[in-house]
């Protein structure tokens, strides 16, 4: 190896070390920021619970209407210690999951179809607007009549909430794909199926995942509202029963369990989004 080659090799090695050190420093900064953010979020939660307890203690909040954190915590502990909450959580989780999956599939299929076929979009436009304008709460009793008191009336209500959100986001995502990108792909010989798989759907992923974050909450809302109006188990049923007997601590405990449940589902959606959209993060980096 000549002297020039050795110098070049040394320069390349130093450059690689510099890049590695820079990446490690960036990763350390990212971890440190996440730790600080989680600590701040936990501190806000403790502050809110402390304020709730304090306002109850000094009499500004009536425990009959608002309960207190200690009673609510005891109720949640009792539920999980005895396992009595699990059948209700299972019913709500299953109805929410089915509503989410079916709603996403329906929204994706119609979003892509109407996004690609303009004449169908124009024909369906007034009907979609009319259906979307219907108050979903009004549909709940109708679904109870059609599908009975079982799980499918809750699923149907959830699908009406999730389906429209995913549909509109998918539709806009497909419509907003760059025409230059599509023309270039056609010039390279891409078929309609290849365009759909490699251009339209990947380009619409950002919009679709934005809708999925919102849809998780709406799927659970559909299930809980359906259970609230008529069911034999589920978190909505539990809350409705407690409300009927003025057990405020049980109502508040049910709401807190539901909020945590939504956070858990949202966590898994975020992981899926990061994996499927990893290429976008790489492009940004």
Image (tube, grey):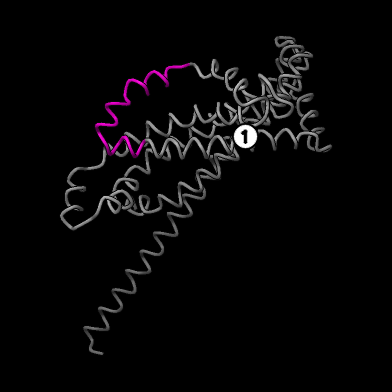
Mark 1 — residue? 95
> Which residue sits at x=33%, y=34%?
171
Q: How many labels does the image show?
A: 1
x, y percent for residue 213 = 48, 36
Residue 151's place in the image compared with 270, above or below, is above
Residue 54, picture quadrant: top right
Residue 22's place in the image compared with 272, above or below, is below
> Which residue sits at x=34%, y=48%?
202
x, y percent for residue 216 = 53, 34
Residue 6, picture quadrant: bottom left
**In magenta segment, residue 237:** no
Question: Which sits in the foreground, 227 or 209?
Answer: 227
Which portion, as a residue range, is magenta? Answer: 111-134
- The crowd level at tag 1 (other Cα within 10 Å; few <14, some 14-19, many 20+) is many
Helix, strand or loop under label 1: helix
Residue 235's place in the image compared with 275, above or below, is above
> Which residue sits at x=70%, y=38%?
90
Report whether 7 appears left or right of 108: left
**In magenta segment, residue 121:** yes
Question: Which sits in the foreground, 239 or 42?
Answer: 239
Question: Which sits in the foreground, 160 or 60?
Answer: 160
Point out the residue furthest to the right here.
82
x, y percent for residue 284 = 33, 50
- Identify the main secondary structure in magenta: helix
> Which residue sits at x=35%, y=69%?
16
Residue 67, picture quadrant: top right
Quadrant for the N terminus in the image: bottom left
Report whether 110 appears left or right of 270: left
Residue 97's place in the image compared with 161, above or below, is below
Point out the residue furthest to the front here.
146
x, y percent for residue 117 = 27, 37
């Amino acid at each position: 190896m000549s002297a020039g080659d050795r110098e070049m090799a040394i320069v390349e090695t130093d450059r690689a070390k510099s890049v590695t050190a820079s990446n490690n420093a960036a990763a350390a900064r990212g971890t440190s920021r996440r730790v600080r953010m989680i600590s701040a979020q936990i501190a806000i939660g403790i502050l809110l619970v402390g304020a709730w307890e304090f306002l109850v203690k000094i009499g500004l909040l009536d425990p009959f209407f608002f309960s207190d954190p200690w009673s609510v915590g005891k109720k949640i502990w009792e539920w999980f210690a005895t396992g009595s909450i699990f059948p209700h959580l299972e019913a709500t989780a299953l109805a929410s999951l089915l509503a989410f999956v079916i709603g996403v599939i329906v929204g994706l299929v119609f979003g892509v179809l109407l996004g690609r076929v303009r004449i169908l979009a124009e024909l369906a436009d007034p009907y979609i607007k009319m259906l979307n304008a219907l108050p979903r709460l009004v549909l709940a009793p109708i679904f109870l009549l059609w599908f009975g008191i079982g799980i499918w009336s809750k699923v149907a209500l959830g699908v009406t909430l999730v389906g429209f959100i995913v549909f509109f986001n998918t539709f806009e995502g497909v419509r907003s794909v760059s025409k230059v990108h599509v023309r270039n792909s056609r010039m390279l010989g891409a078929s309609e199926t290849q365009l759909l798989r490699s251009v339209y759907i990947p380009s619409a992923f950002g919009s679709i995942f934005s809708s999925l974050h919102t849809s998780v909450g709406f799927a659970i809302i559909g299930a809980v509202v359906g259970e609230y109006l008529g069911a034999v188990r589920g978190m909505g049923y539990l809350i409705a029963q407690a409300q009927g007997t003025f057990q405020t601590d049980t109502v508040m405990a049910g709401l807190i369990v539901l909020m945590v449940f939504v956070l858990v589902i949202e966590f898994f959606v975020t992981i899926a989004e990061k994996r499927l959209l990893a290429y976008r993060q790489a492009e940004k980096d």
